[in-house]
DNA sequence: CGGTATCCTAGGGGATACTG
DNA sequence: CAGTATCCCCTAGGATACCG
């Protein structure tokens, strides 16, 4: 408890307290569907609910809706409902949400460059002791 | 199915297929304990199991061990056991693991800069319709 | 010290059906 | 079309106890 950190400087590097910004960010966007939605919206601009669902293979209606609500609450996307028949809902990144794009883009770059190495490591690990 | 992507270029930007590198990376390091362990090891250098546990507030023995095993399998850390009594185990980042550090560092920077905005958005959202 | 092994529960998350 | 509601399974993950 001796090492209290400054507000805004919390989680500086010494300790990862339960409520430090880094951990809370991971809880907010660490979710697969959340980050994929952000990237999809970043690439294609505003998207309707159905378009978004089509972009993200395998996402269920429940999870997509839940993720979008959380993102809206976190100020990452705006939700615009047009009460036509049938109804139309558009999702768009806020400036805050857009500010995450460079980060996620780099993540994607890392993945494309290094995932083969990860696969190789896995294969070797599994081959060494198949029982593990 | 018409838009097939090049190997290595998969998940280029059009579609997020279930097995594209970006999604698989998120599954590998999206985990809170994994990324926190990587950063802790990146900052402090090699760490013993107990030291690592002390760095990461609130992690259970089970989750830490499980995360470290997964990271070892993925080639992100090495695990060195010294069979003394009591036994000593050191964890260290591999070059592959280290290559994630800049990324995670930027994540941390984003968190420290923008999490207050997220908190504000949440407060406003909750205030607008407390029932949600 | 650095783990397994076991038990247990809250929540993640899919499938399906219904609605404005 | 874009949801909500319900059911139900299954895993993440904590607590506890034991071991080399």
Image (cartoon, coloured by chain):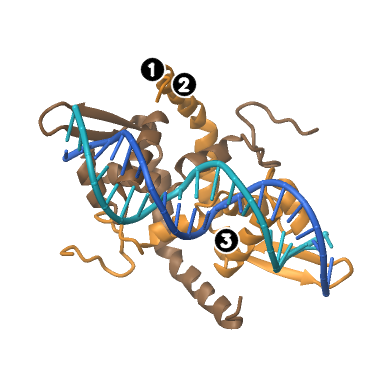
Chain colours: A brown, B orange, C cyan, D blue
Q: Which residue is painted at 57% across and 81% down in the image?
A: A130
Q: Quadrant of residue C5?
A: bottom right
In the image, residue B51 sits, relative to residue A66, either above or below, namely below
Q: Which chain carries label 1?
A: B
* Mark closest to the chain's N terminus, 3 or 2: 3
Around disc 3, counting alpha carbons within 10 Å, would you say few (fewer than 14), some (14 to 19), or many (20 or more)? many
Label tally: 3
Label 2 sits on a secondary structure element that is helix
Percent of width and height locating residue B66: 63, 61
Q: How far apart are marks 2 and 1 (CA)?
A: 9 Å
**Which of the two discs, 1 and 3, sits closer to the camera?**
1
Q: Residue furthest right?
A: B85
Q: Whole-percent x and y of residue A89?
A: 21, 33
Residue B66 - label: none
Do dots 3 and 2 share one subunit?
Answer: yes
- Pointer 3 chain: B
Image: A64 above or below A75: below
Report which residue position mark 3 lands on.
B97
Q: Is B100 left or right of A67, judged from the image as shown?
A: right
Is A87 placed left or right of B44 in the picture? left
Q: Distance between the residues labelled 3 and 2?
A: 37 Å
Residue B72 point in image, percent of width and height: 61, 67
Q: Residue at x 22, y 34 (%)?
A: A90
Q: Position of residue B98 (x, y in %)?
A: 58, 59
Determine the CA span between mark 1 and mark 3. 43 Å
- Which residue is labeled 2 in the image? B123
Q: Earlier in the sequence, mark 1 or mark 3?
A: 3
Q: Left or right: B34 with respect to B83?
A: left
Q: What's the mark number on residue B128?
A: 1
């Amino acid at each position: 408890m001796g090492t209290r950190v400054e507000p805004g400087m919390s989680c500086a590097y010494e300790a990862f307290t339960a409520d430090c910004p880094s951990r809370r960010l991971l809880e907010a966007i660490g979710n697969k569907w959340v980050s994929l939605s952000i990237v999809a919206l970043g690439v294609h601009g505003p998207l309707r609910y159905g378009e978004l669902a089509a972009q993200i293979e395998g996402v269920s209606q429940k999870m997509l809706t839940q993720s979008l609500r959380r993102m809206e609450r976190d100020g990452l996307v705006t939700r615009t409902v047009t009460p036509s028949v049938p109804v139309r809902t558009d999702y768009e990144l806020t400036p805050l949400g857009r500010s995450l794009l460079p980060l996620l883009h780099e993540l994607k770059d890392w993945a494309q460059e290094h995932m083969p190495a990860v696969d190789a490591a896995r294969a070797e690990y599994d081959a060494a002791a198949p029982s593990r």
